[in-house]
Image: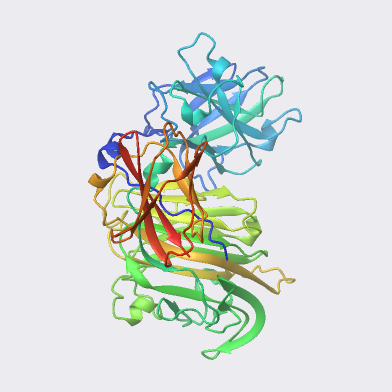
Amino acid sequence: MLKTTLLLSSLLCLAQLAQAQSIEDDFEGNGTISAWTGDDCNINTNLSNPVSQGINTSNTVLEYHDVGGTYANINFDAGRNFDLASYSTFTLKIYIPSSGLTGNQNNQISLKLQDGNLGAPWSTQTEIIKNVSLNQWQTVSFDFANDPFVNLDPTSLDPIQRNDLNRVVIQVNGENNSDEVLAYIDDFYYYDTIQQTTNFSQLVWADEFNYTGAIDSSKWFHQTKLPAGGSWYNGEIQHYTDELTNSSVANGELNLVAKKETYTDQGVTKQYTSARLNSKFAFTYGRIEVRAKLPTGVGTWPAIWTLGKNISEDGAYWETQGFGTDPWPACGEMDIMEHWGTNQNYISSATHTPSSFGGTVNVAGTVVPTASTNYHVYALEWTSEKLVFSVDSVTHFVYNPPVKDASTWPFDAEQYILLNIAIEPGIASSFTQSSMDIDYVRVYQESNVSLQEASPLRESLDAYPNPVTDELTINYSTLTSKPSNIEIYSIDGQFIASQKPVVSGRQIQLSNLKDMPAGMYIASFSVDGEKHQVKFLKD
């Protein structure tokens, strides 16, 4: 099947990364924003969290109270211009209680960027509007490189082509109305989506599922042994099996299937079956990407996650190989994706460590409206500094404890990947079966290519289709001149070919790739004296 996720596209300069500065505020004294201002809007930046639940159990939040102001908003000045070509994403958490609203405005939040140096700063603003739900904490992302935006002045350049924006304005439920709005806002972040990719550009392990039948036993292990007591954790009621009816590969994808059926194993009979896979690959630091479509059904609980290779869990693959030395949560757990059928389309990511586990406070999520109807890329970037969780390259959770010790950071040792669907006791009586369909699982680590071989790429650059059969298109967001020649190298640096590309607008097109052998390649080219590289996979 068509693999549409883009492989990491460029090498970044470490010096550039070191200069990147986040703009953030958790409203508990750990922020870089000096002052928030309410414009025709009451504001309290130190409100005791009135709804400490779900993804936000922090102590304090910002209170946003529009008491009927026509253009009510809150805002702050960054003190510098945003570099949206490199740093394009803003995120925050918001809770809107239905009891705090009057009128019938659309429930939405907008983030506007303005030039605060102008006498009329709104005159050249750019804006992204996102719909929100009531009565629940949710993470909202505003990506000025990829989300639809509105320029108040239609002659303004695209946001990523501008360098005059330095003010953030947040507005709930629109303007030009006198309706009241009460909302709570927390964990405002502005960071670089390119920075997230660091230099994890070397594909070190993958399963593309380009075969048919049972899973590849050289890569995966069926974990079927019941824990002591005969039931899985968290009150789950399924048997995990190695049956083809619960896990098999066909049409270029892995199908993990949860089923309602009577099944007896290890002397225990249960009414539901599923599969739980352990990777036979463990690693420290890198980027994990899983492109998947999720199951549906109240009571289903699919997960893409990792555990420490050292976990002393009877029946886990690495425990059977003699590595089980530490119990959970001392081994560490990173939940890349969890989805509960009781809260359809809400994706959660979390960490479990000795400092916080089970009902961990280290958790956040996002709404993916097509989680069970379309494929999405669930990813984790794991460095020695932090964990960055995203869906389709939009970050919704960053774990970066200020103190890293055995209690908060067991993530300095190898972890392995798990894929499973659990069944909760409250499974709907009408449930029969549903599957998690996985297009691929990929792990990237740092490239062997020297960072000195490529200048820092400030433009947003990607390539598609990737993998490619014959023609490859490279998107280059702010192309100022045309590369006259593109050289293609094998992943180990051997020269393969060169060709004069066809350049149209912001797109560079390579053709006649069909005769190249399958494998990973690097397209290398220079623009304005800077060398750039794009990795692509040839089918």
Residue 182 vertical placement versus 392 (above, below): above
Residue at horizontal 66 percent and vertical 64 percent from the top: 296
Q: How is the image coloured?
A: rainbow
Residue 393 located left or right of residue 431: left
Q: What is the x, y in percent for residue 317?
A: 38, 78
Check the image and name the residue furthest to the bottom. Answer: 267
Check the image and name the residue furthest to the top. Answer: 119
Residue at horizontal 52 percent and vertical 64 percent from the top: 303
Residue 500 located left or right of residue 430: left
Exactly how many numbered labels are in the figure? 0
Q: Who is closer to the viewer here, 506 or 199?
A: 506
Q: What is the x, y in percent for residue 145?
A: 51, 37
- The quarter holding residue 428 reads bottom right
Residue 385 vertical placement versus 339 (above, below): above
- The quarter holding residue 184 reads top right
Q: Who is closer to the viewer here, 415 or 330?
A: 415
Residue 45 located left or right of residue 431: left
Q: What is the x, y in percent for residue 31?
A: 38, 32
Residue 45 vertical placement versus 409 (above, below): above
Residue 203 located left or right of residue 275: left
